[in-house]
Amino acid sequence: MKPFLRQQLARYADRLGELEFLLSREDIMKDMAQFLKLSREHTDVTAVASRWVRYQQREADLAAGQALLAESKDDADMQDMAEEEITSASAELQQLEVELQRMLLPKDPDDARNAFVEIRAGTGGDESALFAGDLLRMYSRYCERRGWKVEVFSESPSELGGYKEVVLRVEGDSVYGALKFESGGHRVQRVPATETQGRIHTSACTVAVMAEQDEAEAIKINPSDLRIDTYRASGAGGQHINKTDSAVRITHLPTGIVAECQDGRSQHSNKAQALKVLTARIHEKDRAERAAKDAAERKSLVGSGDRSDRIRTYNFPQGRLTDHRINLTLYKLLSIMEGDMDDVVNALQAYEAAQQLAALEVGGGT
């Protein structure tokens, strides 16, 4: 194990002792907020410290096995026992080191949240709208594979069956942590259904993935900063949806961010849903600004997630998907479009972890 990791883990062991002392004080229960904060930290630190203790135990076992092997050259049974212990300890040490590296990485508090996925047609006209529909299907299928619940929050269909814009709400375990790297520009290269001469066209869509915030976050928005407009919904939905001013558009005046919803049957439900999306967009704007600031100081992990970043190309004639941020190329495009995204998601998460570990090593060495 690298020295900087040992230093980090030693600090966890020291911090565990500090936390146990603080939580044992009689006056700690007088400040319940502080008590809960320290208790949560104690849980996290204990998990790391216990794995570090196990690592040190297995290191000692490995050293004992190696010493026994050296001392028992004339005893075949003892040598077999020593070699078995060396093999077992070495394998567990490798596994423990991987676990400890992962546990030391900075945690994004939003990773465990549900998410909104916004897909918007870009350059390419009708073909771009059709590709937006394909992306909607891809993400929906992937979420089904993960056991997540998918809800179409709002939609603006195109005439040929695609979407000018569609917003999904995805609910489940660690949704944002898996989907957050999908934000950016997605480019498709293929022969459109409307192309009569078989020429390959290039079009694009943009995707924005936003962590859903708690209702308490929505409450923090100053009502005086909001302009709420109602209008008559358009599109499918029956007589009721077309005859009442139930659609709602909310504008956050300080930022100019807009969210709207017309899919619900009542103005109240549409307002509530639009406010959820608005809160997520404001939060994502703050996140993007922080990411841009960090990127100016050091290399960005996997891009900023800005819509203008071209992150991925889907080349149908070659059956190829290329993620430009990590130079990943997979020749399994059709299965990916059916929701088999694990290779892509896992590669992006592994890349981020490697970058974070490198940054941690630099920090640990200073």
Image (cartoon, rainbow, N blue to C red):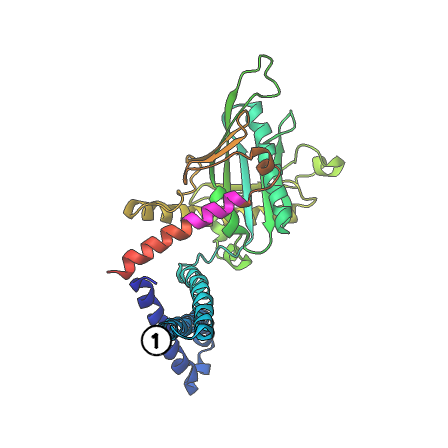
Residue for point 29% across, 61% down: 364
Q: Secondary structure at mark 1?
A: helix
Q: Residue furthest top?
A: 197
Q: Which residues are magenta?
A: 343-351
Residue 348 lies in magenta, yes or no?
yes
Occupied quadrant, residue 75: bottom left
Residue 28, quarter of the rendered image? bottom left
In the rendered image, the quadrant that contains the N terminus is bottom left
Crowd around label 1: few <14 · some 14–19 · many ≥20 (10 Å): few
Q: Is residue 305 above or below residue 82?
A: above
Q: Left or right: where does residue 355 sit relative to residue 148?
A: left
| Residue 76, placed above or below residue 284 | below
Q: Nearer the viewer, residue 83 or 199?
A: 83
Q: Main secondary structure of the magenta part?
A: helix
The answer to whether residue 153 is seen in the rendering is no
Query: Does 288 appear in magenta?
Result: no
- Direction bottom: furthest residue: 26
Q: In the picture provided, is 322 more to the left or to the right than 1?
A: right
